[in-house]
Image (cartoon, grey):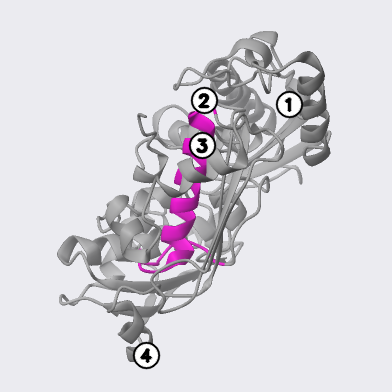
Amino acid sequence: MSNEFVKSSRGQHGMATGSFDLAQDSGAGRQALRQRRMEKYMNYKIFASESVCAGHPDKICDQISDAVLDNALNFYSKSRVAVETLVTKNHTTIAGEVTCPKKLNFAAIARRVIRDLGYTREDLGFWDKSPIDVFVHQQSPDIALGVNDGGAGDQGMMFGYATDETPELMPIPIMLAHKLARKMDELKVKRLPYLRPDGKSEVTVRYEKGRPAEVETIVLANPHDPKVTKDQVRSDLYKFAVLPVLTEYKLDKVEPDKVILNGTGKWAIGGPATDTGVTGRKIIVDTYGGMGRIGGGCFSGKDPTKVDRSAAYAARYIAKNIVAAGLASRCEVQLAYVIGYKLPIAREVETFDTGKKSQAQIEKFAWNLLDLSTEGIITGLNLRRPIYRETARYGHFGDQSYPWEKIINR
């Protein structure tokens, strides 16, 4: 990894995204102590994260579920949605609860998503004309009783995480994995039509003293027309995906022999024909790639009264703003809720000994950022909008267009 990245790369908020200096205003002894403390919490030497392409079976399901949500919110902003999708060979099943004044055409919504993802050929074993079963009813009146009064739509704990490793204030392994997955999807449309829907990426990063030092290995998997050789696919993806992504993050080139393609040696047919997909099964991909803790529920197919989703966004918003404000280099925020209760029953900020201010100052800053009642989060982040299908691919965090990724100016 280049010295420019590690020592002087600056993010969009003017902070040093790769700096080793944790406390610039501290004495050398205190700084060294804080460095050792941080290493205690960042004691891994290697960290790997994966992402998946938009046509991955689980992501097909996430996008269908969130497309249902977007359609409901587009008609009525207070619609209640909890929808699960399952895809398998030549079949889609949609089930769950939707409370919306308009009757939605669930099958038509699903077919549109499937078609957009490139599943338009019967020989792929799954396409936009495959059979679809729908089992959807209204929200339970017992749940609605608490939610109608502004309470949380579920119980559980949620975590938000941020780190100054990248301009997006996200861990670099997962950001690189997302970028590679997105790039492969773009190439399917613009440059490499022999690539087929589905695909995965995985990036292994070596850390030194708690900071990213080098990208060691990149794994790419993508089904393709068997008439194209694996060597050609590897060469094309190295040139048009790997090198541009490394350049974007000002990283040293990874040699071609460190890029693994299609580990079994052959992959022609991907998608639901070979691997069943279910909504909510890629929560590590959706969040921080395994770095930082995650909550007890997935996001997709849930309207924002479900704190599994909205409170996870709120926790990320708070953690990101703490790091963006220069109050810490690394931050994790925990929130916990009870169904029907308006306010969290627990909240906590952890900075892993990277804090630049006292814990009391950081907490005062954190808890003044956002009203953490269920309705306060929904209103403060403007969540009653049809913005969710896009979140169901390449992660829910790190994209500046999402409201929970906004940085306040203070």
- Left or right, 80 with reference to 180: left
Residue 252 picture location, percent across and down? 68, 14
Q: Is residue 213 magenta?
A: no
Give the secondary structure at mark 2.
Answer: loop
Residue on which disc 2 sits: 167
Please state the extent of the stretch shown in magenta in the rendering: 297-326
Q: CA distance from mark 1 to mark 2?
A: 14 Å
Question: Counting residues from the N terminus, which is met first, the one under dot 3 or under dot 4?
Answer: 4
Q: Quadrant of residue 227?
A: top right
Relative to 56, does residue 364 appear above or below in the rendering?
Answer: above
Give the residue at mark 3: 322
**Residue at the location (67% across, 12% down)?**
7
* Tag in front: 3 or 4: 3
Quarter of the view holding residue 186: top left
Q: Are marks 3 and 4 in contact (CB under 8 Å)?
A: no
The amino acid type found where label 2 is placed reads Pro
Mark 4 — residue? 142
Q: Residue at x 44, y 72 (%)?
A: 84
- The N terminus, quarter of image: top right
Vertical placement of residue 51 versus 258, above or below:
below
Report which residue position mark 1 lands on: 211
Indicate left or right for 13 with 171 as reference.
left
Mark 2 is surrounded, within 10 Å at the Cα level, by few (under 14), some (14 to 19) or many (20 or more) other residues, namely many
- Residue plotted at (44% across, 27% down): 191
**Sequence-first disc among 4 and 2:** 4
Tag in front: 2 or 3: 3
Q: Earlier in the sequence, mark 2 or mark 3?
A: 2
- Residue 111 is situated, as x and y percent measured from the top left of the image, at 32, 63
